[in-house]
Image (tube, rainbow, N blue to C red):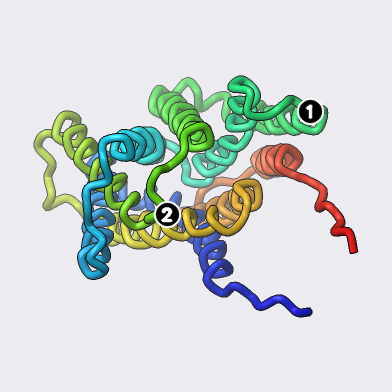
């Protein structure tokens, strides 16, 4: 019997794979004239307002209780304030393609963290994947070794390191703590709103007197794109996909994200791509694939 296609799931997976690949370009363009914490605050703030409108229309806006509020706050801080915020800061000085390749290392950190916290066991396959992935990291840093003399470049790498660590920590936290609410829109409303408030405070501290008149229309439109597509549509699609397929299957989309981000950075921003960089990207993607790959069990007829 032929199975019906789940078009909603196909759309969700496509949105995650394609849109998040374009957000690295969007961030790079946005921070050209807008301070990074303002970019993130605008992004999450507008996303939160859109979620609120949807909830009001559905009559689903409500208090989620202190236990769930604490859960959403922790996820918001780890995955939006730190992971998304630090990535935005890093892209002030790093090419968008390089930022996306470093982000692709997150599944490897998740794998290592899962072993440390007893969520899964180390396997030969996993060990090989980690080694291959880190070979890619070594090659990237070897390719740009001279750039480490530049403090801005070095700081960008450090911020990306904190960003992917926070994302991995947030993912592991969600695995070890059950979410009490199944309302995706309501959860995202709280996450976006809390992140925006925290990021606005950080923006006022690190950029107390922003010259709004210097913000270009291109950067403003990029920030709006990040909010509507990168946050609202992509995050909703990501959460929807996780409810219908395994996290491993969703994580495979990270390969598409990286390829799209590197290509767009080269095409639209003239970012340099060397042979070493391409090999490093392939090694990192291959390492993540080996870690996540599982043979499909044959069904017994």
In the image, is residue 95 above or below residue 176? below
| Number of other residues with Cα within 10 Å of mark 1, as a class: few under 14, some 14 to 19, many 20 or more | few
In the image, is residue 107 above or below residue 300? above
Q: Can residue 81 be seen at all in this image of the molecule?
A: no
Q: Secondary structure at mark 1?
A: loop
Q: How many marks?
A: 2
Q: Identify the residue at horizontal 40%, vertical 38% (top origin).
A: 79
Q: Can residue 36 be seen at all in this image of the molecule?
A: yes
The residue pinned by badge 1 equals 123
Q: Identify the residue at horizontal 64%, vertical 31% (top origin).
A: 111
Q: Quadrant of residue 234?
A: bottom left
Q: Is residue 105 left or right of residue 203?
A: right
Distance (Cα) linking label 2 and label 1: 31 Å
The residue pinned by badge 2 equals 235
Q: Is residue 175 left or right of residue 296?
A: left
Instruction: Say which mark, if any, is on residue 85.
Output: none
| Number of other residues with Cα within 10 Å of mark 2, as a class: few under 14, some 14 to 19, many 20 or more | many
């Amino acid at each position: 019997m032929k199975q019906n296609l789940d078009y909603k799931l196909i759309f969700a997976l496509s949105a995650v794979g394609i849109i998040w690949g374009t957000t690295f370009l969007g961030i790079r363009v946005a921070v050209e004239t807008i301070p990074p914490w303002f970019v993130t605050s605008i992004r999450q703030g507008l996303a939160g307002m859109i979620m609120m409108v949807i909830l009001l229309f559905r009559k689903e806006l409500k208090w989620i209780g202190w236990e769930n509020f604490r859960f959403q706050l922790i996820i918001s801080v780890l995955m939006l304030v730190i992971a998304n915020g630090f990535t935005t800061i890093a892209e002030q000085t790093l090419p968008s393609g390089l930022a996306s390749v470093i982000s692709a290392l997150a599944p490897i950190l998740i794998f290592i963290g899962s072993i440390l916290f007893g969520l899964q066991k180390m396997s030969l396959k996993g060990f090989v994947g980690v080694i291959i992935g880190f070979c890619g990291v070594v090659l990237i840093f070897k390719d740009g070794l001279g750039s480490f003399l530049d403090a801005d470049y070095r700081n960008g790498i450090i911020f990306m390191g904190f960003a992917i660590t926070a994302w991995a920590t947030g993912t592991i936290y969600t695995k070890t703590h059950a979410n009490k609410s199944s309302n995706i829109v309501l959860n995202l409303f709280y996450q976006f709103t809390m992140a925006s408030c925290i990021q606005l405070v950080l923006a006022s501290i690190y950029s107390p007197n922003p010259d709004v008149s210097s913000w270009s229309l291109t950067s403003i439109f990029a920030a709006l794109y990040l909010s509507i597509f990168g946050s609202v549509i992509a995050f909703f699609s990501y959460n929807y996909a996780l409810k219908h397929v395994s996290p491993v299957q969703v994580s495979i989309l990270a390969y598409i994200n990286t390829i799209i981000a590197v290509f767009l950075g080269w095409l639209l921003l003239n970012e340099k791509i060397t042979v070493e960089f391409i090999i490093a990207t392939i090694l990192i993607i291959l390492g993540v694939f080996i870690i996540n790959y599982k043979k499909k069990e044959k069904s017994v007829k």
